[in-house]
Amino acid sequence: MKTVPVAELMADGRGRDAIGLGRMKSEGLDARHGTILSLEDINVSFDGFKALTNLSLYIGVGELRCIIGPNGAGKTTMMDV
C-alpha cells in the first residue's frame, strides 16, 4: 500500500476514498464514530531485532494517552510509524 500524506489527500479531494482514511472528508476528519487515530498489528524490526510486535493503539475523541517505558521499549519507533 502506498502512503500518501493527508495534506495531499485533502488538496485533491481523494480523502473520502483513501484506504485507511475512510472517514476523511474534504473539510477534515469525521470523528463522530469516536476513534481519531488507530494503529493495528504494527510490526517493525531492525536487522532481526523486533522493535514492535503486533502493536495496536486506538485513540478516541477527547482522550489523552501517555506512552511510557524504559529505554529501548519502542516508544520512538511507534511515534515514527
Image (tube, helix red, strand yellow):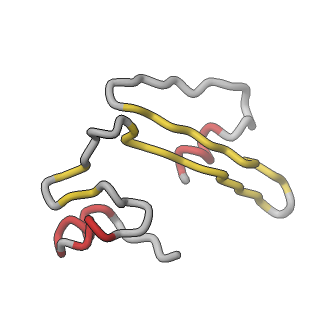
Whether 27 is drawn above or below 64: the answer is below
Whether 32 is drawn above or below 46: the answer is above
x 16%, y 61%: residue: 26
x 72%, y 48%: residue: 54
Q: Position of residue 11 (x, y in %)?
A: 17, 70
Q: Which quarter of the picture shows residue 59?
A: top left
* Viewer-nearest residue: 1 or 35: 35
Whether 9 is drawn above or below 57: the answer is below
Q: Position of residue 24 (x, y in %)?
A: 27, 57
Residue pushed farthest front?
33
Q: Tell me: 81 left or right of 5.
A: right
Q: Position of residue 29 (x, y in %)?
A: 25, 49
Residue pushed farthest right?
48
Q: Tell me: 19 left or right of 78.
A: left
Q: Where is residue 7 in the image (x, y as percent from the top left)?
A: 25, 63
Q: Which quarter of the picture shows residue 78?
A: top right
Count of numbered labels shown in the rendering: 0
x 57%, y 27%: residue: 67
